[in-house]
Amino acid sequence: MTDLTRVELLHDEGRIERWIRFGRAATEEILDRRRRALWFAPGAVFAFVRWAANDYGTAVSRIDIMRAVRAGEPLTTVPGVSPGGEVYLRLNGWARVERVLQAIDQVETLDIDPVEACPDHWRHIANRLSAGETPRAYSLERHRAWLLRQGTSE
């Protein structure tokens, strides 16, 4: 398990929630009734959502779409992810997080698993939303182009 990326999830209703929106975990570990850990193999892509509230409402809303790295690869540290990963998208603020969740839904409406989507699409969404612009929707044509660049086909 030393070459796997560990993501700690938490569910404390109405206070703190950390969950995976998409991704294929290699294994799962139940820590207690509110916490569990998912382990991702190198190369696995996943979306990690973090949300927390205080007495005045939402305090933190964040989403990271990242790739689990192999030992020795450069990485970015993210709270709750050990050791970290290659970040494709990193946004905060509920309005932006919600837009990313909608973009993930849009990819799924094409019958494409978001883990298989082109990493450049997630980077595009991050850049456009950071600039206050509307990102382009993912398309079957773009996905086919990505598969061709990877040397795979549908």
Image (cartoon, rainbow, N blue to C red):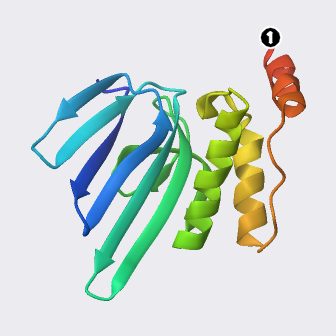
Name the one closer to the observer, 4 or 100. Answer: 100
Count of numbered tags: 1
Quarter that holds the C terminus? top right
Instruction: Judge whether residue 23 can be spotted in this image.
Output: yes
Question: Residue visible at 72% across and 51% down?
Answer: 123
Query: Could you tell me which secondary element the residue under label 1 belongs to?
Result: loop
Residue nearest the observer in this picture, 85 or 103: 103
Q: Looking at this view, is 31 or 68 the one in front?
A: 31
In the picture, the quarter occupied by the N terminus is top left
Is residue 89 in sight in this rendering?
no
Residue at far bottom of view: 56
Horizontal and vertical percent for residue 131? 78, 73
Label 1 Cα neighbours within 10 Å, binned few <14 / some 14-19 / many ≥20: few
User: Is residue 73 shown left or right of residue 40?
Assistant: right
Residue at image x 51%, y 57%? Answer: 63
Tag 1: residue type?
A: Ser
Residue at x 55%, y 43% (from the top left corner): 66
Q: Quadrant of residue 92?
A: bottom right
Question: At 33% across and 70% down in the image, what residue appears?
Answer: 52
Residue for badge 1: 153
Residue 137 percent location from the top left of the image? 81, 47
Q: Is residue 40 left or right of residue 15?
A: right
Q: How far across and how far down the image is residue 107, in percent? A: 69, 38
Q: Position of residue 43 (x, y in %)?
A: 55, 27
Q: Is residue 73 left or right of residue 24?
A: right
Which residue, as the protein is rendered here, is positioned at the far front?
109
Q: Nearer the viewer, residue 98 or 72?
A: 98
